[in-house]
Image: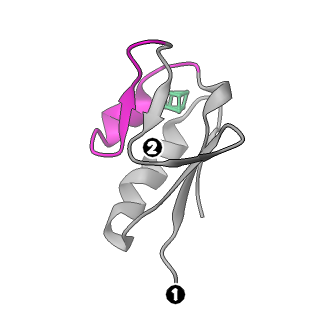
């Protein structure tokens, strides 16, 4: 089975920092606009994505579940 991806619809991020709390290896808040960055992600039309190892799925699913505006998907 191919690795899952994290998808981040960054434009709608409100910078609450929940995702960073769950996984600072994957997420950081941007110093300039205060939104979350998915570290090392590729961007296409404002949507960021990154392939993840299976052992990182759960923590990122928790980050997704914690996002108040539902802009993180693990799929
Ligand atoms: S949890 Fe969602 S809204 Fe909050 S910083 Fe992360 S991506 Fe942005």
Query: Toward the viewer: 35 or 16?
Result: 35
Residue neighbourhood size for the residue with mark 2, other residues' Cα within 10 Å, grouped as few (<14), some (14–19), many (≥20): many
List the single residue furthest toward the bottom. 1
What residue is at 54 percent from the left and 34 percent from the top? 67
On the image, numbered disc 2 is attached to which residue? Answer: 63
Whole-number angstrom distance, CA of label 1 to CA of label 2: 23 Å
Q: Within the magenta stretch, is there residue 26?
A: yes
Q: Quadrant of residue 10?
A: top right
Q: Where residue 75 sits: x, y (%)? A: 60, 64
Work out whether 3 lies above or below 43.
below
Q: What are the residue bounds of the magenta stretch?
A: 14-32
The answer to whether marks 1 and 2 mark residues whose Cβ atoms lie closer than 8 Å is no
Q: Is mark 2 within 8 Å of ligand 1?
A: yes
Secondary element under disc 1, as helix, strand or loop, is loop
Q: Where residue 65 sits: x, y (%)? A: 53, 44
Query: Toward the viewer: 23 or 65?
Result: 23
Secondary element under disc 2, as helix, strand or loop, is helix
On the image, numbered disc 1 is attached to which residue? Answer: 1
List the single residue furthest toward the left. 25
Q: Quadrant of residue 52?
A: bottom left
**Visual colour scheme:** one colour
Q: Where residue 18 sits: x, y (%)? A: 42, 30
- For marks 1 and 2, the one nearer the N-term is 1
Q: Which callout, 1 or 2, points to the residue nearer the camera?
A: 1
Q: Which mark is residue 55?
A: none
What residue is at 34 percent from the left and 40 percent from the top? 22
Q: Within the magenta stretch, is there residue 36?
A: no
Q: Where residue 34 sits: x, y (%)? A: 47, 15
Q: Is mark 1 within 8 Å of ligand 1?
A: no
């Amino acid at each position: 089975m191919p690795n899952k991806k994290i998808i981040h619809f960054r434009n709608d991020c409100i910078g609450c920092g929940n995702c960073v709390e769950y996984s600072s290896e994957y997420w950081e808040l941007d110093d300039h606009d205060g939104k979350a960055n998915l570290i090392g992600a590729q961007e296409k039309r404002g949507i960021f994505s990154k392939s993840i190892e299976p052992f990182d799925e759960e923590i990122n699913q928790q980050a997704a579940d914690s996002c108040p505006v539902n802009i993180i998907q693990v799929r």
